[in-house]
Image (cartoon, grey):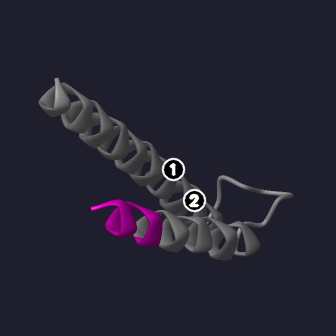
């Protein structure tokens, strides 16, 4: 599970970098820039969810040891 979260976190970071290059920073809320912004936001949400999953698995493992 740990490897799964790391791989998808790296993929999400790659998507953020790729879509940041697609944004027209002079008009960020028009045409293709909006799609880039939405994808960046979705990738950030995915990273947050993966971190929550990893933390919950650590907590579960610690609670089973006791």
Residue at the location (65% across, 76% down)? 18
* Image location (x, y in percent) of residue 57: 25, 42
- Count residues near mark 2 (Cα–Cα under 10 Å), then give few for <14, some for 14-19, many for 20+: some
Q: Which residue is mark 1?
A: 44
Picture layout, residue 52 above or below residue 23: above
Numbered badge on residue 11: none
Task: Single out the residue that lies furthest toward the right.
Answer: 26
Say how many tags the image has: 2
Picture layout, residue 1 above or below residue 50: below
* Image location (x, y in percent) of residue 3: 38, 69
Range drawn in magenta:
1-7
Residue 25 located within the stretch drawn in magenta: no
Give SS at disc 1.
helix
Relative depth, front residue between 65 and 40: 65
Relative depth, front residue between 61 and 9: 61
Name the side, left or right, on which 38 lies relative to 60.
right
Relative depth, front residue between 20 and 1: 1
Name the side, left or right, on which 42 lies relative to 22.
left
Relative depth, front residue between 66 and 57: 66
Task: Single out the residue that lies furthest toward the front.
Answer: 66
Report whether residue 32 is seen: no
Residue at the location (70% across, 74% down)? 22
- Marks 1 and 2 sit apart, C-alpha to C-alpha, by 15 Å
Name the side, left or right, on which 27 lies relative to 61.
right
Task: Tell me the quadrant of the picture where the N terminus can be found.
Answer: bottom left
Residue at the location (41% across, 68% down)? 8
Picture layout, residue 57 above or below residue 25: above
Task: Tell me the quadrant of the picture where the C terminus can be found.
Answer: top left
Q: Which residue is mark 2?
A: 34
Secondary structure mostly seen in the magenta stretch: helix
């Amino acid at each position: 599970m740990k490897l799964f979260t790391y791989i998808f976190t790296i993929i999400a970071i790659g998507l953020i970098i790729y879509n940041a290059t697609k944004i027209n920073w002079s008009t960020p809320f028009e045409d293709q820039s909006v799609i880039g912004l939405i994808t960046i936001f979705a990738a950030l949400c995915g990273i947050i969810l993966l971190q929550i999953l990893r933390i919950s698995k650590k907590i579960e493992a610690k609670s089973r040891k006791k």
